[in-house]
Image (cartoon, rainbow, N blue to C red):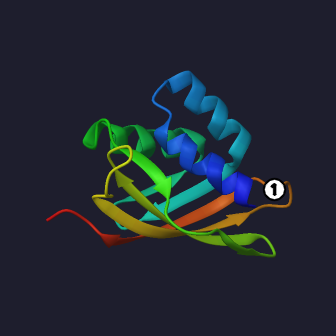
Amino acid sequence: MKELIEQYIESWNETDPAMRAGLLDKLWAADGSYTDPLAEAHGRAEIDAVIAGAQAQFPGLRFTLTGPVDAHHNQARFTWGLGPEGGEPMVEGFDVAVTDGDGRLASVLGFLDRVPS
């Protein structure tokens, strides 16, 4: 599960639309869903649009895992940060991911712990 979550984080950093689409096809179930306090997306195209929107809002910043991936059964929880490469995160949160029977992301629920004012 750790490798899947690492790839999930990397998909949020991939700025090339074609490369990101390939990652999303590999990682997400076709009917996967993503929900956080600011967005709700269903299916790979909507998830891609949310990621592209975050990249446009925070250009040059990168998502990183900030702690271990805690997983059991078909679910995982993990903390992440968004900030300059090698710098302090400006945004911090945690997500809960659930996989389907094929090991692809079926849903990700995101929570924001710290956001810029």
Residue 3, how many percent across, how many down?
73, 53
Task: Tally the marks.
Answer: 1
Taking depth in this image into account, of 28 and 55 the one nearest to the observer is 55
Identify the residue at image location x=34%, y=43%.
61
Residue 111: image quadrant is: bottom left
Residue 101, how many percent across, how many down?
85, 61
Label 1 neighbour load within 10 Å: few <14, some 14-19, many 20+: some
Residue 24: image quadrant is: top right
Identify the residue at image location x=40%, y=37%.
52
Which quadrant of the rendered structure holds the C terminus?
bottom left
Q: Is residue 37 above or below residue 8?
A: below
Taking depth in this image into account, of 18 and 47 the one nearest to the observer is 18
Name the residue type under label 1.
Answer: Gly
Identify the residue at image location x=78%, y=70%.
74
Q: Which residue is mark 1?
A: 103
Taking depth in this image into account, of 17 and 89 the one nearest to the observer is 89
Residue 33, how many percent across, how many down?
58, 57
Q: Is residue 56 left or right of residue 3?
A: left
Q: Is residue 5 above or below residue 13?
A: below
Q: Is residue 38 above or below residue 28?
A: below
Which quadrant of the rendered structure holds the N terminus?
bottom right
Identify the residue at image location x=55%, y=50%.
9
Give SS at disc 1.
loop
